[in-house]
Amino acid sequence: MLEPPINQLPVPDLIIGSARLSDASGGERDHIYAATGRVTRSFPLAGALEVDAAVREARAALSHWRMMPGRERARLLRALGEAVLSHAEELAAIQTIETGAPISFSNGFPEVAASHFLYNAGWADKVGGEVVPVGTSAFDYTMEEPYGVVGAIIPWNASLIAASQVLAPILTPGNTVVMKPPELAPFASLRLAELALEAGLPPGVINVVTGGAEAGESLVRHPGVSKIHFTGSRETARQVLAAAAENIVPVCLELGGKSPLLVFSDADLMDAARQAMGAVVGLSGQGCALPTRVLVEKEVYSRLLVILKGLLRRVAVGDPLEPGTQMGPLVSAQACERVLAVIERARQEQDGNLLAGGTRMDGPFGDGYFIAPTIFSDVAEESALARDEIFGPVLSVMSFEREEDAIRMANSNPYGLAAYVFTNDLRRAHRVGAALEAGTVWINGMDQMEPSMPFGGYKQSGYGRLGGRAGIREFTRSKNVWLPVGPVNGGRLL
Ligand code: NAD
């Protein structure tokens, strides 16, 4: 394995207003490089003390930021987007070091991250209100106002994109933010906040408290926070909601998924199989919207399995820093053990046929957290393999006979983040797309997620939307203003 260029990692100090803190009340934690299991560097963990200081700074920065003309906020957000692009190589390296994602994959992240700032900047001077018809004796209008300080809790996988996707619509209408990066991968979020300061965003607009669950919980419980955005797992979301209940703050939730990929017999099978492969290559299956449940029409089922098996055999698993690598390790030793336990239980309980993979990789991979790309076929519909988010390189494949069976199977899952449909029948594409319970449906392929697309979950994949006009709406609230214009008599309108 190549040595990770850890000199590319930012100094891991907390960012609170214009101050940098290298010590924090929660102690410190080591970051581990997933390809070798070795420590890169340690970073401070925020506790309630630092979270409180960060919320105060965010509140202090609020009036200047929200009263600033929209065109000026737009200029600063565009400058941040440009800064992300001009530091693309460095940011991609940071993501690879902190998560183990192959560099061939991380190289695409900065452009996506920048696109969120560049797109949202366009809304900064267009967020207004409307005149409300109430008759001629009064004038009534609405104002779309920022909430105030938003607490943003970020997951580790593709954290640069996850942070940008959230920060851009938070900042655009004039909110300030306290961001809690993931403890498994804190560096890209920190570098992003540094770039924001360099681009001219005033100190205090983005504050960063590196830390774990304790810092996250302190942020959610802080009375100075007016809204919470949480991206992460369904299990943590339940704790976030319980904590948010104390101050009755609104919460936006972007959670996990077990997205179905429906393959009909008239589809281009190679395209469908390549899409399914995306569920294991790149992020090693550690992505919220990946198509990890493949439902295939019976007459093409065995053909698709042959293609899938062939494609998986050729996946270049390897050193994340080698440009030819398509799939790297899982993020941590715990993640690796957890996924291996899921595979083992599925084998013991005969939840499906193990067609490929299923083992931890040894030899040069032995010190890292590598699991071979894994496929189970004939997966039992009610099994954990078919229902649970595994967050590892494991594909579950099953067959269906009729369109209505495919829809029923796709929808019979508590998650509803995304769904994929492969068919060349236009009517079926629209019919099935409409019937699927998912926040996003991709038909015949998914290339990129544009920042103009509203993204979010149905069911237990969360609620609230990031992206597009919906993302701006998510981080503004409506105020109604009523003003009498008719003659007044004793406080009553005539
Ligand atoms: P996680 O739930 O373990 O952690 C997410 C964040 O929550 C981390 O920053 C963590 O420190 C923090 N946290 C932990 N306990 C907390 C608490 N009690 N209060 C407040 N914050 C707390 O998730 P993860 O492992 O970082 O990310 C993987 C999960 O995120 C998967 O389920 C994945 O599908 C989901 N995800 C969803 C999206 C989306 O857009 N829908 C995007 C990426 C990841």
Image (spheres, rainbow, N blue to C red):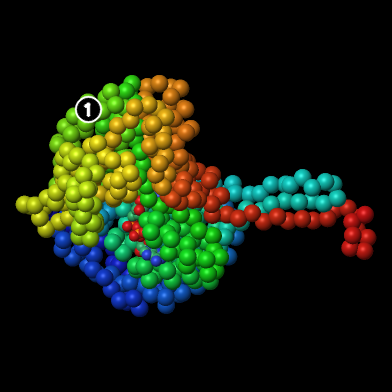
Q: Residue at x 15, y 56 (%)?
A: 368
- Within 10 Å of the Cα at label 1, are there few (<14), some (14-19), or many (20+) other Cα atoms? some
Please say whether residue 349 is visible from this viewpoint: yes
Residue highlighted by disc 1: 302
Which quadrant would residue 231 be assigned to in this image?
A: bottom left
Please say whether residue 329 is visible from this viewpoint: no
Q: Position of residue 289 (x, y in %)?
A: 36, 44
Q: Residue at x 41, y 47 (%)?
A: 414
Q: Position of residue 325 (x, y in %)?
A: 17, 43
The quarter of the rendering in which ligand 1 is drawn is: bottom left
In the shown orientation, is residue 338 left or right of residue 167? left
Compared to residue 279, the image places residue 24 above or below, namely: below
Q: Nearer the viewer, residue 338 or 192?
A: 338
Query: Which amino acid does the dot numbered 1 rest on?
Result: Ser
Q: Position of residue 212 (x, y in %)?
A: 34, 67
Which quadrant would residue 147 be assigned to in this image?
A: bottom right
Which quadrant would residue 189 be assigned to in this image?
A: bottom left
Q: Residue furthest front?
A: 349
Assign the C terminus to one quadrant of the image: bottom right
Q: Residue at x 50, y 58 (%)?
A: 251
Say which element carries label 1: helix
Q: Nearer the viewer, residue 78 or 175?
A: 175
Compared to residue 64, the image places residue 172 above or below, namely: above
Q: Residue at x 82, y 51 (%)?
A: 138
Q: Residue furthest left?
A: 363
